Amino acid sequence: MKLPLSFYEREDVLQICRDLLGKYLMTDIDGKVTGGLITEAEAYTSQDKACHAFGNKRTNRTQIMFGEGGHAYVYLCYGLHQMFNIVTNREGEANAILIRAIEPKIGIDTMLERRNMDKVLPRIAAGPGSVCKALGIRREHYGLPLDGDTIWIEDRKVIVPDKDIVQSPRVGVDYAGEDAFLPWRFRIKGSIWTSLPK
DNA sequence: ATGTCGATTTGCT
DNA sequence: GCAAATCGACATA
């Protein structure tokens, strides 16, 4: 079943991030349905120096994070990679979750095409830029609601027990001072479909 | 108007 | 393992 907006409107972004592991991230883009099981995600809040909306800084780019939970925040990084995030919490609270890796499940042929690969390797959708490329997510999808029919998340009753979840510091946020140490990266232990440990 | 730098990936040495 | 690729957001002036 498709997760309702109420799933994302909860206040505890870390809990939501944890709950997302094992869910299916699905897209219907360019006439192709693709999707996979979320194996890795990171949480960000406006209290956190690594977050684009740190200090409740509203800009054209970050404004969506201040809206209600359950919308897509897509941005460009290093001039070439798109990153897909899920906005959480109620309007006014800028929280977001970066999807960092999925295990490919649906539309694998399409993902191979988009990634210019001829066989499925773990790196097909490991790393936030790769996830977006494999699923076809682009900046034009900024702001889309996740209860729509372009990007959504399904609960397919995959249970990920607490003992199979690893928390660690987030990737690529060294510039965030002490906040770089917050253990807000969640991964499914032992999954080969995650980006490398730092 | 200009300069810096990034929530990264890839390919080559 | 390292460095290039590549551009928009943001800060400063």
Image (cartoon, coloured by chain):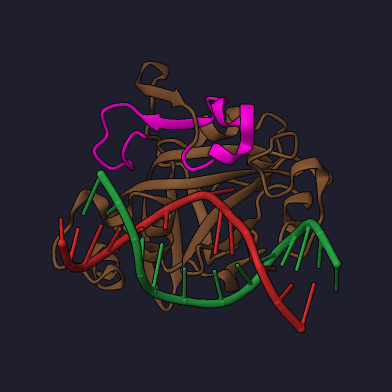
Chain colours: A brown, B red, C green
Viewed as shown, does residue A97 lie left or right of A121? right
Total numbered badges shown on the rendered structure: 0
The percent position of residue A133, horizontal first and vertical second, equals 39, 65
Q: Residue at x 79, y 60 (%)?
A: A59
Q: Residue at x 43, y 78 (%)?
A: A30
On screen, residue A92 above or below A59: above
Picture quarter containing residue A189?
top left
Which portion, as a residue range, is magenta? Answer: A171-198
Q: Give A6 or A197, whichever is nearer the viewer.
A: A197
Picture quarter containing residue A187?
top left
Q: Residue at x 43, y 46 (%)?
A: A100
Viewed as shown, does residue A184 lie left or right of A107? right
Q: Quadrant of the C terminus of chain A?
A: top left
The percent position of residue A101, horizontal first and vertical second, equals 38, 46
Picture quarter containing residue A167?
top left
The percent position of residue A38, horizontal first and vertical second, equals 40, 43
Q: Residue furthest top?
A: A163
Q: Give A24 or A67, whichever is nearer the viewer.
A: A67
The percent position of residue A168, horizontal first and vertical second, equals 45, 26
Q: Is residue A189 magenta?
A: yes
On screen, residue A124 above or below C8: above
Viewed as shown, does residue C2 lie left or right of A175? left
On screen, residue A162 above or below A86: above
Q: Give A7 or A131, whichever is nearer the viewer.
A: A131
